Amino acid sequence: MFEELEKIQTAALAALESVQSEALLEQWRIAHLGRSAPLMQVFEKFNSLPKEERPVVGKRANEVKRLLESHLAERSEALHQNALAQALETERLDVTLPGRPIQQGRLHPSTQILRRIYDIFAEMGFQVYRTREVESDEYNFELLNIPAHHPARDMWDTFHTITPGVLLRTHTSPGQIHAMRENAPNPVRVILPGMCYRYEQTSARKEIQFNQVEGLAVGHHITFGDLKGTLIDFARRMFGAAVRTRFRASHFPFTEPSAEMDIECFICGGKGCNVCSSTGWLEILGCGMVHPVVLRNGGYDPKEFSGFAFGMGPERIAMLRYKIEDIRYFWGNDLRFLEQF
Ligand code: PHE
């Protein structure tokens, strides 16, 4: 029995030498410590031994078993460490490799300027009022005091639809009539932003589509002073507290008196440069007191009510602000342009 135990131990340890993987180790365990392993057979034959041999053989057999078990544990740990080291080596990440750049979305420059304009006027109590882009001749012209053969129609080259009397709005001013008719005889204070269309030869300064932001305030005792105060305050918030402004007399059929507002050129500080055509000033909007005829068309009695209106081009403001030299970039969908904002 002793000899047999000795053989079992030597054979098992020798076999263990060549075990190189965790799977093979499991096979080894089954072969040498499993139910039908030779060592276990020794325990089975135990009862057939003479009584006095049993304790010694038993002791030895248990020693062999513990020895094999401890070798198994040792080997298992070593193989496990090995496998781990190998995995770390082959699955290694090079964290110093530069990452793939994440494409970042951004707001269109017109949207950015529009939102800034909304914020400024919201602080002054103006609500955003949206009106249609497809308009009638009546709203785009007639009700704004521009009858069919009025020479001022030349200022708004028009895209007409195939339906007579229906057109793409050439400015946001027809929204004034909608806003007034919806609110009269209550006071209104709104801005009307949106896309406008003109039948034009495109150039660096002219596009067939562009945004406008119209402003309209109608109420009791509204004066030209209110108009100037509102627009000067707007210019300061938009272009900085130090910006200088000036009003020049102008003409629009739907306002009387009418004016255009210039801001001092922020490129050259008023000295004169190619952006301001050496004048030192940049025109940014048209404005005036709502014409009595237009007030009446909107449902207000001009003896009782007065109001002011203005219209500005956000693309033009964006061009000045970011020194964009061609308006056609705005709707060209060129990422090289858009990604700069
Ligand atoms: N609608 C005018 C334009 O398109 C601008 C304007 C609006 C002028 C309101 C006066 C009052 O040029």
Image (tube, grey):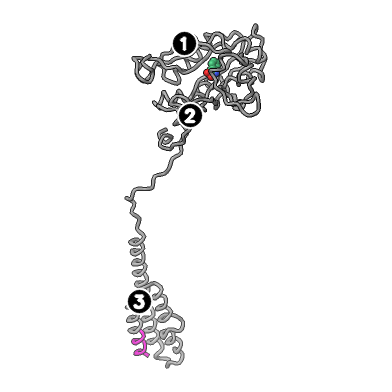
Residue matched to label 3? 19
N-terminal of the pair, mark 2 or mark 1, is 2
- Residues tagged 3 and 2 counted as in contact (Cβ below 8 A): no
Q: Secondary structure beneath disc 1?
A: strand
Q: Is residue 162 above or below residue 81?
A: above
- Horizontal side of residue 245 vs 126, given as left or right: left
Q: Is residue 265 above or below residue 42?
A: above
Q: In this view, does 283 lie above or below 74?
A: above
In this orientation, which residue lies closer to the viewer: 68 or 262?
262
Residue 128 sits in which quadrant?
A: top right
Q: In which quarter of the image is ligand 1?
A: top right
Q: Give the range drawn in magenta.
A: 1-8
Residue matched to label 2? 110
Find residue 330 and report its horizontal and vertical position in percent: 46, 31
Chief SS of the magenta region: helix
Residue matched to label 1? 247
Residue type, mark 3 in image: Val
Q: Is mark 3 within 8 Å of ligand 1?
A: no
Q: Residues within 10 Å of mark 2 (few under 14, many from 20)?
A: many
Residue shown at 44% from the left, 14% from the top: 262
